[in-house]
Amino acid sequence: MKKFSLTLLILGCITFLAACGSGSTEKVDKIKIGASPTPHAEILEHIKPELKKKGIDLEVVKFDDYVLPNKALDDGEIDANYFSTVPYFNLQKKENGYKFSNVGAIHLEPMGIYSHKIKKVSDISDGAKVIVSNVPSEWGRVLNIFVKNNLIKIKSGVAIDKATFEDITENPKNLVFEHSVDPTLLTSAYENNEGDLVAINSNFAYEKGLNPVKDSLMIEQNDSPYVNIVATKTSNKSNKDIKKIVEVLHEKKVQDWIEQEWGGSVVPVNE
């Protein structure tokens, strides 16, 4: 009888310990975010350990272009994406009817204007060829850099993020803007000396070892509206895990790391 009681006691303890063990295991939610390889995916990889503590298993899906991250989000292949600027995001929603929401601005990547031959803005020659991407939402961004450097003027009353080359009213150096190149090919155009000046998105510049702060002839200022955001389907904008991810991205220690890692050529924002 004593032996039987002892057996029951041992079994009870094992059951109790097993219950305690299973109760202490936190539920981990899996979230998939599509991102450009640099710096977006690198930033997300950096915060993975912190997210793990908060019960989020983050999977980063890398995309090398600007079209597939939104298609993947719309198709439900990913839960959110982190790659686009606000103007591009708005343009894509308008053109494709995407039901997406901006759930947080994370950083600004200042656009740079690069040149192998020209070392000073004052040395830009008459009729210089400027190569720009074929993405309309980026044209005003590039034009604004030239406006800030007193090289052109834009029609009064035109919002800079909506400006096009037809809105140029003064162009004393007769700059020729060629805007037919895919963004992914801008670094190749620069390397092949296809233009006197090439406007390159910072994420593509990084991949080729270019630092916008050190290597560009002209650079976008920090008052730019072209901040990079985390986006998700509008039906999912209240998702607690996505909100947590944005909160972590806005933490001071993460923002300090971003500034240090990219030497000021990626500027964190908290909006």
Image (cartoon, rainbow, N blue to C red):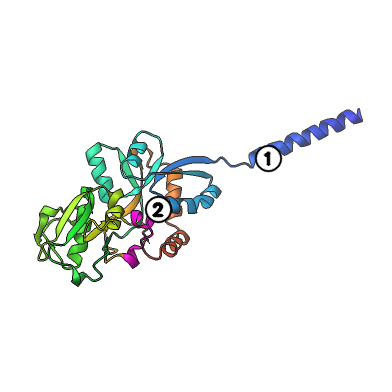
| Crowdedness near tag 2: few (<14), some (14–19) or many (≥20) residues, C-alpha within 10 Å | some
Measured from the top left, where is residue 93 in percent x and y? 26, 41
Q: Which amino acid does label 2 sit on?
A: Thr
186 sits to left or right of 149: right
| Crowdedness near tag 1: few (<14), some (14–19) or many (≥20) residues, C-alpha within 10 Å | few
Q: In which quarter of the image is residue 100?
A: top left
The residue that label 1 is drawn on is 21
Location of residue 134 with respect to 112 vertically, above or below: above
Instruction: Tell me how far mark 2 sits from mark 1, CA to CA.
Output: 40 Å
* Foreground pick, 188 / 163: 188
250 sits to left or right of 111: right
Evaluate whether residue 250 shows in this view: yes
The residue that label 2 is drawn on is 38
Q: Residue at x 45, y 41 (%)?
A: 32
Evaluate whether residue 225 shows in this view: no
Q: Residue at x 30, y 57 (%)?
A: 191
Which residue is farthest front? 192
Q: Which residue is drawn at 36% across and 45% down?
A: 64
Measured from the top left, where is residue 214 in percent x and y? 34, 67
Viewer-nearest of labels 2 and 1?
2
Disc with the residue nearer the chain's start (2 vs 1): 1
Main SS of the magenta part reads helix
